[in-house]
Image (cartoon, coloured by chain):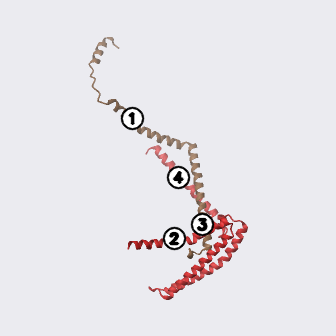
Amino acid sequence: MNTEDIPLQTLLRQNRPAPALPSRFQQNVWRRIEDAQSPAESASWLDALANLILRPRFALAAAAVLLLTGVFTGTLEGRQMARHDAQMNYLASVAPHALR
Amino acid sequence: MNRSLVILLGALALGAGIFAGSYYTAQRATVACCAKPADDLGWLQMEFHLGDAEMARIRELHEGYLPKCAEMCAKIAAAKHELSSLIGNGTNLTAEAQIKLSEIAVLRAQCQAQMLEHFAAVSQAMPPEQGQRYLAEMKKLTLGTNELMEQSMSDHAGHEHGTN
């Protein structure tokens, strides 16, 4: 830096206009920063969930749980249906439909 | 569309498919395997946990009851056929048709009484607790439907009377 320019620079700095900031300027700046960050947060939540789903261990475990739950509830329902069918067979043999 | 959202929706669809497929397969397999007992009495043995001796006695009662039941059913069917001929295409209910209706009602009552006697005899061939449960179940299944129908008819009649 040229030392001869120092007085000039000081003079320029002193004469630089410093406009007054609008009221609540800093607060508004922070609010805009927060607003800009919030969609990024929700996207990252969805990404995290998608990443979790794509993990082989998690995917296999979830598939196994769903498969077992389906087999269990299907078997229960099937047993109820089978019981009902057998009951209706017996009923049809002892109680003519005209009497029911 | 967002890649993560596509993955999530795809996973949900796949999960629903796995659950529905396993549920349906298990249900069909269970029905196919358990719904066809050896004969009409299979349900009694399964439901009331009956032993061989009790089943033999019940089978004897059942086989004794079936011809009587068939005979009553044939009488009712014949009477209904006669009623149908008496009514023909006419719009008025003749005296003969009314008599036939009464005959059918009497036959039905006799058939119902015979059926209830059979239920009572079968219930006595079971251990007391199971017998009570059987009798209650049979009454509910055979008489309950009529009661429901009569109840709905009386409700309907009452409603109409209320509005007039």
| Chain B tint as drawn | red
| Marks 2,4: beta carbons within 8 A | no
Which residue has dot 2 on it? Answer: B148
Q: Residue at x 62, y 79 (%)?
A: B70
Q: Earlier in the sequence, mark 1 or mark 3?
A: 1
Numbered disc 1: what chain? A
Residue picked out by circle 1: A34
Q: Residue type at mark 2: give it.
A: Leu
* Residue B79 versus residue A88 in the image, above or below: below
Asked if both marks, 2 and 1, belong to the same chain, the answer given is no
Classify mark 1: helix, strand or loop: helix
Type of amino acid under label 1: Glu
Q: Where the C terminus of chain A falls, by quadrant? A: bottom right
Dot 1, crowdedness within 10 Å: few (<14), some or many (≥20)? few
Q: To which quarter of the image does residue A89 belong?
A: bottom right
Q: Which residue position holds label 4?
A: B16
Residue B29, image x, y percentages: 61, 60
At 46% across and 39% down in the image, what residue appears?
Answer: A44
Instruction: For residue B72, say whether it is visible.
Output: yes
Q: Chain of mark 3?
A: A
Give the residue type that dot 3 points to. Asp
Q: Quadrant of residue B91?
A: bottom left
Which is in the foreground here, disc 2 or disc 3? 2
- Mark before the other along the chain sequence, 2 or 4: 4
Location of residue B70 with respect to A65 vertically, above or below: below
